[in-house]
């Protein structure tokens, strides 16, 4: 109350002790204006803002040219966030002679709020000329120039603020934020760390440093900073959401689930947290709960394409293929260019067995996106499945035009060439596959088996297949390849040992046939017969196997009996209702 009385006295002095008779209202008018002004100040001090505004406007009616009344209305309206009116009274305050720092700074901020940053910059430029030692003025001016994309000016002004306040975490943080926005992340990190060294409780410093770490793809570092910030503000839902997202990226699904469940319980309207929680459940194979969260997100915004995309993925995992397709169609209706949506739809159509539909989607897509590797890869898969190996080859080669280091595509191309008996091309492709993916055990095995089957480079064949077995020791097919290579080398005992292991792991016609060949060459004819018969049970019409059985000593009678057994088996198979 005392402050209000002092202000009232100062007001009277201002009104009665300044100006000249020619430029100001008469004494009686000025007295009335001063009275209203004094009452306005009193109401303002009590927080009765509407009454204060009414009294200020009444004062202005008696004395339109009093700059202090305009300045007071600028301050009141700015405080009420009525920035358009604040600008009006700020401009008139300047017009009638009030160019004080307070008026300039409030007017500058109001200009920014009404999207007139250039005028805001001019107001702050005048303010810095009045007081060039106030770091806050330089920070405000720098922020506006940053907004106007005048980066060099902004940097200079942020640095000026730091020179004036070298130990202010806020000033250092502002400079760090600027460096982060222009992509100079190392300098941004340096400024944030300086700020935190001065004040370890500087909340915005941890947030800024976390954002920098995110941009550098250091999600662990970002999570660490957000955790420190959360200790300063444990109830900050937005921060918990951000930290939950980092935990999700780090595949710390326990941590992400705990945080995001807290967030959605605090704020059920947080769409992003519902969506991210849905992703956590998806990765934890809790598909029903995942779908529930995605649907909650869609309840908040039915046009959220990301949630439609993810719920489609969850429906696919549940085997609800038609719902998955329906959701991806919604995604494409919302955003025809949604990343990956066309190729994902094609994948769903392949799962449905609609290869022509998938082919149509992909061919249309690659006409627009000739750099989409996955689309061409799927086309190659479809063409290969349809027996159109030439088209499949062209699709895979197109992928390699885009990325020649894709080991998986080299592998797929090798399979095509192997099937077409283009063995040299197959070997070249498989060698490229292991060049770009040294863990591709199957590619090592394919090269070794081709060499073994052709009876060449047998030493290298053994080494390659052994490499495959180092990567996958329990793979029966690789054991078969190694046994076959030993057989070609004439190491019959080693061949038999490997093929016997293979036959224990895999029931495969070729493995039984290979083992039969080895036993035959070892003179173990009865064992050979058993293996050929096992092979024929898996491939009843195989003429080559029948010839091998015939070639065994004393095989004629057994073969005829065997023929009868196989014929009966075929007949019974036709009667089986599955």
Image: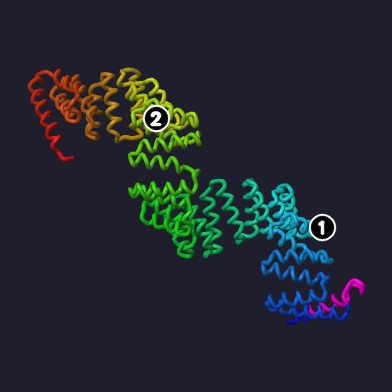
Q: Indicate the position of residue 228 as horizontal and vertical percent values.
A: 55, 58
Seen in the image, is 128 located left or right of residue 552? right
Q: Which quarter of the image is occupied by the N terminus?
A: bottom right
Image quadrant where residue 558 sits: top left
Element carrying mark 2 = helix
Could you tell me residue 56's position as x and y percent?
76, 75
Task: Specify which label sits upstream in the sequence, 2 or 1.
Answer: 1
Read off the residue under disc 2.
411
Q: Residue at x 48, y 56 (%)?
A: 244
Separation of disc 2 and disc 1 at Cα?
Answer: 70 Å
For the residues bearing labels 2 and 1, Cβ distance under 8 angstroms: no
Residue 15 drawn in magenta:
yes
User: Which residue corresponds to the image point at 48% horizontal and 36% vertical from the top-left?
Assistant: 372
Is residue 353 visible to the viewer in this orientation of the structure? yes
Assess disc 2: are there few (<14), some (14-19) or many (≥20) residues with their C-alpha within 10 Å of its C-alpha.
many
The answer to whether one can see residue 255 in this image is: no
Q: Quadrant of residue 3?
A: bottom right
- Judge by depth and name the residue closer to the eye, 363 or 96: 363
Report x, y in % for residue 126: 80, 58
* Observer-nearest of 117 and 242: 117
Bounds of the magenta span?
7-25
Secondary structure of the residue carrying tag 1 is helix
Q: Name the spot of residue 191 as percent of width and height, x first.
A: 65, 52
Q: Which residue is mark 1?
A: 129
């Amino acid at each position: 109350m005392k402050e209000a009385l002092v202000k009232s006295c100062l007001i009277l002095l201002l009104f009665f002790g300044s100006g000249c008779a020619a430029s100001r209202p008469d004494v009686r008018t000025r007295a009335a204006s001063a009275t209203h002004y004094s009452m306005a100040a009193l109401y303002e001090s009590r927080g009765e803002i509407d009454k204060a505004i009414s009294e200020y406007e009444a004062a202005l009616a008696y004395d339109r040219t009093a700059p202090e009344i305009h300045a007071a209305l600028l301050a009141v309206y700015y405080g009420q966030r009525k920035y358009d009116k604040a600008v009006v009274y700020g401009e008139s305050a300047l017009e009638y002679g009030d160019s004080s720092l307070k008026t300039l700074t409030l007017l500058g901020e109001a200009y920014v709020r009404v999207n007139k940053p250039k005028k805001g910059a001019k107001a702050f430029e005048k303010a810095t000329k009045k007081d060039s030692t106030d770091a806050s003025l330089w920070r405000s001016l720098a922020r506006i120039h940053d907004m106007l994309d005048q980066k060099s000016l902004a940097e200079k002004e942020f640095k000026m603020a730091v020179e004036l306040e070298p130990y202010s975490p806020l000033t250092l943080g502002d400079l760090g934020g600027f460096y982060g926005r222009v992509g100079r992340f190392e300098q941004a990190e340096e400024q944030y760390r300086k700020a935190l060294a001065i004040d370890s409780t500087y909340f915005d410093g941890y947030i800024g440093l976390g954002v920098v770490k995110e941009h550098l793809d250091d999600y662990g570092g970002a999570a660490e900073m957000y955790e420190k910030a959360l200790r300063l503000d444990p109830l900050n839902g937005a921060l918990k959401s951000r930290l939950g997202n980092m935990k999700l990226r780090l595949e710390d699904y326990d941590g992400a689930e705990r945080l995001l469940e807290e967030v959605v319980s605090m704020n059920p309207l947080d769409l992003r947290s519902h969506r991210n929680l849905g992703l956590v459940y998806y990765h934890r194979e809790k598909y029903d709960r995942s779908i529930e969260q995605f649907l909650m997100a869609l309840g908040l915004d039915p046009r959220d394409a990301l949630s439609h995309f993810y719920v489609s993925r969850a429906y696919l995992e549940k085997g609800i293929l038609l719902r998955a397709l329906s959701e991806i169609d919604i995604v494409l209706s919302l955003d025809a260019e949604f990343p990956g949506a066309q190729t994902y739809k094609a994948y769903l159509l392949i799962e449905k067995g609609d290869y022509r539909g998938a082919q149509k989607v992909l061919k249309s897509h690659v006409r627009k996106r000739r750099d989409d590797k996955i689309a061409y890869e799927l086309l190659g898969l479809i063409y290969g499945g349809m027996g159109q190996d030439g088209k499949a080859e062209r699709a895979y080669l197109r992928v390699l035009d885009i990325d020649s280091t894709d080991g998986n595509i080299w592998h797929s191309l090798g399979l095509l060439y192997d099937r077409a008996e283009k063995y040299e091309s197959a070997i070249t492709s498989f060698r490229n596959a292991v060049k770009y993916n040294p863990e591709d055990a199957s590619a090592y095995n394919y090269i070794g088996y081709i060499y073994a089957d052709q009876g060449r480079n047998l030493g290298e064949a053994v080494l390659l297949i052994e490499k495959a077995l180092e990567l996958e020791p329990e793979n029966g097919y690789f054991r078969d390849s190694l046994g076959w290579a030993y057989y070609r080398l004439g190491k019959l005992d080693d061949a038999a040992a490997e093929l016997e292991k293979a036959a224990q792991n895999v029931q495969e016609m070729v493995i039984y046939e290979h083992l039969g060949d080895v036993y035959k060459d070892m003179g173990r004819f009865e064992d050979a017969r058993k293996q050929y018969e096992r092979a024929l049970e898996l491939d009843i019409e195989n003429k080559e196997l029948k010839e091998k059985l015939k070639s065994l000593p004393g095989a004629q009678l057994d073969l005829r009996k065997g023929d009868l057994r196989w014929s009966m088996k075929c007949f019974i198979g036709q009667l089986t209702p599955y």
